[in-house]
């Protein structure tokens, strides 16, 4: 699967911080039932790799690893069952490793120089991160103008309320959302309801 195909699976990619791998599969089932198939599990907790392995068992789920910083984490994520990789920034080593392993990569960018470095590496799809703190919609509009060939997934500070404004930009294929699953007690019904609302957002085809 190409990275654009992952980005087009749904208008929102849930950005997940999983503390307990036992919660991973019910969370994935609820998100998929609500209409969100691309799921990003961030490598921010000791349970993350086990969570990816559990979520990968859910029919319809396309599970990726987020907050991947280096080649070792990339390989560990692939071994756990990740089908795409998301990074908060853009280095030379990580994209080269992803290309060698034929795994879709969505690296984080926040400047024109970041995008130009990505283009030099053969990339054209990026995570605009941290979206709100990096200047919001106005900043991404300004960046997207000279890089018309690029497509973006803004992540960071986006909510259900503000997501439609981001998705209205021609260069935006989807957004990353951390509002869908709260850390703590598991509530599958609430997660499915939140996913269903997010899945209704308009996405360019």
Image (cartoon, rainbow, N blue to C red):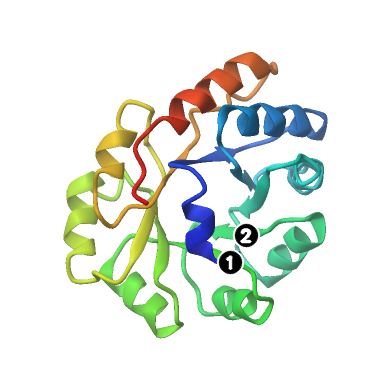
In the picture shown, does residue 160 fall above or below 157?
Answer: above
Q: Residue at x 77, y 33 (%)?
A: 25
In the rendering, at what x and y percent does residue 90 appear?
47, 69
Q: Residue 1: x, y in percent?
A: 61, 64
Q: Is residue 189 left or right of residue 6?
A: right
Q: Residue at x 70, y 18 (%)?
A: 186
Residue 165 in the image: state x and y as whole percent. 25, 37
Which residue in the protein does label 1 denote? 104
Q: Position of residue 99 (x, y in %)?
A: 60, 78
Q: Residue furthest front?
A: 205
Viewer-closest of 157 and 37: 37
Q: Which residue is mark 2?
A: 84
Vertical relation: 22 (above or below) 66? above
* Towards the viewer: 166 or 41: 166
The residue located at (65%, 53%) in the rendering is 65
Task: Report helix, strand or loop for mark 2.
Answer: strand
Earlier sequence position, callout 1 versus callout 2: 2
Report the residue that reaches farthest toward the bottom. 120
Can residue 106 be seen from the camera position used here?
Answer: no
């Amino acid at each position: 699967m190409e990275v654009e195909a992952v980005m087009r699976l749904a208008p929102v990619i849930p950005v997940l911080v999983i503390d307990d791998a036992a919660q991973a599969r019910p969370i994935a089932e609820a998100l998929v039932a609500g209409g969100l198939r691309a799921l990003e599990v961030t490598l921010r907790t000791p349970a993350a790799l086990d969570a990816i392995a559990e979520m990968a068992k859910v029919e319809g789920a396309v599970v990726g690893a987020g907050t991947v910083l280096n080649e070792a984490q990339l390989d560990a994520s692939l071994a756990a069952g990740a089908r795409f990789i998301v990074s908060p920034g853009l280095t030379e080593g990580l994209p080269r490793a992803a290309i060698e392993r034929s795994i879709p990569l969505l690296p984080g960018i926040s400047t024109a120089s970041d995008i130009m470095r990505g283009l030099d590496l053969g990339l054209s799809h990026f995570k605009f991160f941290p979206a709100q703190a990096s200047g919001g919609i106005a900043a991404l509009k300004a960046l997207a103008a000279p890089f018309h060939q690029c497509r973006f997934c803004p992540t960071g500070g986006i909510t259900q309320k503000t997501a439609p404004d981001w998705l209205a930009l021609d260069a935006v294929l989807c957004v990353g959302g951390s509002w869908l699953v709260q850390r703590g007690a598991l509530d599958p019904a609430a997660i499915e309801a939140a996913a269903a609302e997010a899945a209704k957002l308009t996405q360019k085809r």
